[in-house]
Image (tube, helix red, strand yellow):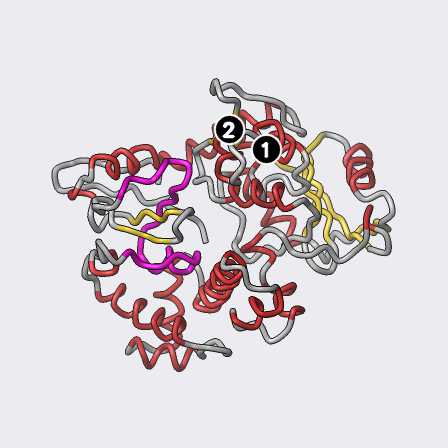
């Protein structure tokens, strides 16, 4: 689930909260005019609040912003008892219908409600429920169900439960269900192959873009490599270098839609939430990659901020290394990481491409 990216909330007085920095200033000021325009979620407490919540102001690096309470809950956060953020959302018949569907999804234990059941709860036909839900939430009811389960899994693990207990407590019938579904939300699907890709077959395909060739490699579990360059042979060398023991197999037809989806990010579109990825990484690297995916389009974070978000504020070099070793460029947007002084630092696919990607994203974000 992505944090606030596209909407630019405005109060009747003309005050805008177009960026995370502006939203955080409203939180620091306990600005009541921001009430109902966005929700803040605190990573260290697992709670989401109104902007003017009387609780102690959290540190900037520990805060995420969302349009609505439902989005924060889907990401695994719970409502603050002091400011009651669920009561702050503006009245809207569409939102009422979607909230009814969300409540039914959230109350389900083992099986996702059908569209017919959700439509009945929301007083809409299944078709209109699906369309309205996607328009309001940006994801489908099924994706919301999946996101809720991943949120429960994270909470269970954070509470110290064992992996098996956490899995079943979050509603996964088996560990294989987690491997099938959790990758795109967690960015940390267990790899389907041994060290160096031993025993894996990686299908690959190319496409031409304004920034050069894009190469996408994928195992049966998901995308394991995205590269941008000028030469097919060199990109294949990069892919084989990352997975020296894997077998590479060209599959332009089978990967056509996936490649098109990845290439669309070069035009300023966020990667589709359903894109599965299959990558290897340490726990710290995965935390950094997850933080990168939470950065709103058009914005950047310093390596220091990424290290702090991963719980190791002094590990700035390790955060930079995690960005450099990200195997799925664009999907995990490591181009949004910059130096502490605001300068463009190294990028595996060239600093000029990094600058072009950021310029495109900022342009798109400004138009929204």
**Residue receiving disc 1:** 319
- Near mark 1 (Cα within 10 A), the count class, few <14, some 14-19 or many ≥20, is many
- Residue 233: image quadrant is top right
Asked whether disc 2 touches disc 1, contact meaning CB atoms under 8 Å apart, the reply is: yes
Residue drawn at (25%, 35%) of the image: 28
Residue 205 spot, x, y in % from top left? 74, 47
Between 359 and 320, the residue placed more toward the observer is 320
Answer left or right for 273 relative to 116: right
Question: How many tags in the picture?
Answer: 2
- Residue 65: image quadrant is top left
Answer left or right for 97 relative to 243: left
Residue 309 spot, x, y in % from top left? 48, 39
Residue drawn at (30%, 75%) of the image: 122
Answer left or right for 56 relative to 129: left
Estimate the spatial distance between the alpha carbons at disc 2 and disc 1, rounded to whole Å: 8 Å
* Labels 2 and 1: the sequence-earlier one: 2
Secondary structure under tag 2 reads helix
Between 196 and 363, the residue placed more toward the observer is 196
Residue 40 colored in magenta in the image: no
User: Is 112 located above or below residue 41 in the figure?
Assistant: below
Magenta residues, start to end = 56-80
Residue 76 colored in magenta in the image: yes
**Residue receiving disc 2:** 304
User: Is 13 located above or below residue 39 in the figure?
Assistant: above
- Near mark 2 (Cα within 10 A), the count class, few <14, some 14-19 or many ≥20, is many
State the quadrant of the N terminus. Answer: bottom left
Residue drawn at (55%, 63%) of the image: 161
Res. 33 mark? none
Secondary structure under tag 1 reads helix
Residue 9 spot, x, y in % from top left? 25, 43
Residue 72 spot, x, y in % from top left? 37, 55
């Amino acid at each position: 689930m992505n944090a606030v990216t596209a909407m630019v909330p405005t109060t009747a007085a003309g005050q805008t909260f177009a960026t995370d920095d502006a939203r955080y200033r409203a939180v620091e000021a306990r600005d009541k005019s921001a009430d109902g325009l966005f929700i803040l979620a605190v990573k260290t407490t697992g709670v989401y609040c109104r902007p003017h919540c009387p609780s102690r102001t959290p540190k900037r690096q520990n805060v995420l912003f969302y349009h609505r309470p439902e989005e924060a809950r889907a990401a695994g956060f719970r409502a603050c008892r002091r400011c009651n953020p669920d009561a702050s959302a503006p009245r809207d018949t569409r939102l009422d219908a979607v909230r009814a569907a969300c409540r039914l999804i959230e109350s389900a234990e083992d099986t996702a409600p059908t569209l017919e059941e959700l439509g009945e709860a929301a007083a809409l036909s299944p078709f209109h429920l699906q369309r309205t839900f996607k328009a309001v939430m940006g994801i489908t009811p099924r994706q919301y169900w999946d996101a809720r389960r991943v949120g429960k899994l994270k909470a269970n693990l954070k509470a110290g439960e064992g992996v098996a207990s956490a899995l079943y407590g979050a509603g996964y019938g088996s560990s294989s269900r987690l491997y099938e579904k959790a990758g795109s939300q967690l960015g940390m699907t267990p790899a389907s192959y041994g060290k160096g890709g031993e025993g894996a077959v990686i299908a690959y395909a190319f496409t031409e873009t304004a920034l050069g060739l894009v190469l996408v490699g994928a195992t049966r579990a998901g995308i394991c490599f995205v590269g941008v360059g000028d030469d097919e042979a060199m990109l294949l060398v990069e892919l084989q270098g990352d997975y020296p023991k894997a077998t590479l197999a060209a599959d332009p037809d089978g990967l056509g839609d996936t490649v098109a989806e990845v290439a669309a990010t070069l035009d300023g579109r966020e990667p589709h939430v359903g894109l599965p990825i299959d990558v290897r990484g340490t726990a710290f690297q995965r935390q950094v990659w997850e933080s990168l995916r939470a950065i709103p389009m058009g914005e950047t974070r310093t390596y220091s901020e990424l290290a702090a978000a991963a719980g190791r504020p002094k590990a700035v070099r390790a955060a930079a290394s995690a960005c450099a070793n990200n195997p799925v460029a664009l999907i995990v947007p490591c181009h949004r990481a910059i130096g502490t002084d605001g300068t463009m630092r190294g990028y595996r696919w060239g600093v000029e491409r990094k600058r072009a990607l950021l310029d495109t994203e900022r342009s798109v974000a400004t138009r929204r």
